Image (tube, rainbow, N blue to C red):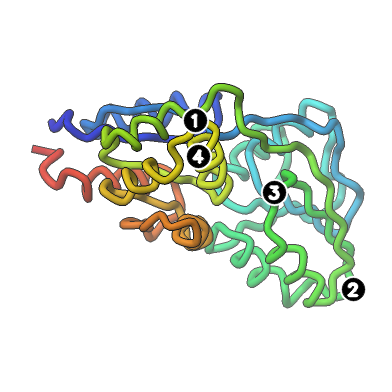
Amino acid sequence: MNRDVRAAVFRPDDERTDEAVELLDSLGADPVPDPMLAVEPTGETPAPGDYVVMTSKTGVELVAEAGWTPGDATLVAIGERTARAMREAGWTVDLIPEEYSSTGLVQMLEAEVDGNRVEVARSDHGSDVLTDGLADAGADVHETVLYRLVRPEGSGESAELAADGEVDAALFTSSLTVEHFLEAAAERGVRDAAVAGLNDAVVGAIGEPTRETAEAHGVAVDVVPETASFEALATATVEAAAPSYRE
């Protein structure tokens, strides 16, 4: 196994970081966990709707803990991770799109939501693609912000390592992780050097929106996995950084 790949990962400072470190370690990389997201609950729960759309495991867990249940609504999950959390809460998941994204949700629902009230419950950084797309399909759309995503205090160690040329791979899991990384780099006075360091490394983005955000800020993206999952992102990025890592 090749331990020369130092891979920076920016997932929230909860079990997702632990899972990421474990996976990267199993791939033979040297993980650098630097969480760029922290969850601040708003205390809100979804409003009633004919359809209730939830876009994250975090959101599901927050509202389940608050005692919310979907009632007779058609319950929609953005992907399997969210659906699994719903089932663990004791709810029945009715719909999951083939493509785990806002676009995939719109494509799945647009033919059936005309005239229906659709409740979208998510973070404060949800994409307008979902709400605008459902509204264009004739739905009465209401959005509830369940939690805010903020940058943890003290984040940015990976930015300094990148600026010093000591990061071989970087794994961005959302547009917000890109923006928070660059904010942390700027706070530490190393933004330009950190971008240059990333451009000498292998950068992975979990999907096209994340890639577009990174490239808009001057960060070249080398890897976008076919499947928008962290496992696919990590595997493809480490493979690109060190093709021999399985040897």
- Tell which tag, 2 or 4, sits nearer the viewer: 4
Mark identifier at residue 181? 4
Along the horizontal axis of the image, is 11 left or right of 75?
Answer: left
Mark 2, other Cα within 10 Å: few <14 / some 14–19 / many ≥20: few
What residue do we see at 55% from left, 22% from top? Answer: 154
Whether residue 5 is visible, yes or no, is: yes
Q: Earlier in the sequence, mark 2 or mark 4?
A: 2
Q: Earlier in the sequence, mark 4 or mark 1?
A: 4
What residue do we see at 88% from left, 55% from top? Answer: 49
Mark 4, other Cα within 10 Å: few <14 / some 14–19 / many ≥20: many
Location of the C terminus (image quadrant): top left
Q: Position of residue 161 (x, y in %)?
A: 34, 30
What residue do we see at 85% from left, 44% from top? Answer: 46
Mark 1, residue position: 188
Along the horizontal axis of the image, is 179 left or right of 137?
Answer: left
Q: How far apart, in angstroms, are the residues tagged by discs 2 and 3?
A: 26 Å
Answer above or below: position of 238 versus 73. above
Answer above or below: position of 239 versus 85. below
Where residue 130 sits, quadrant-wise, is: bottom right
- Tell which tag, 2 or 3, sits nearer the viewer: 3
Q: How far apart, in angstroms, are the residues tagged by discs 2 and 4?
A: 41 Å
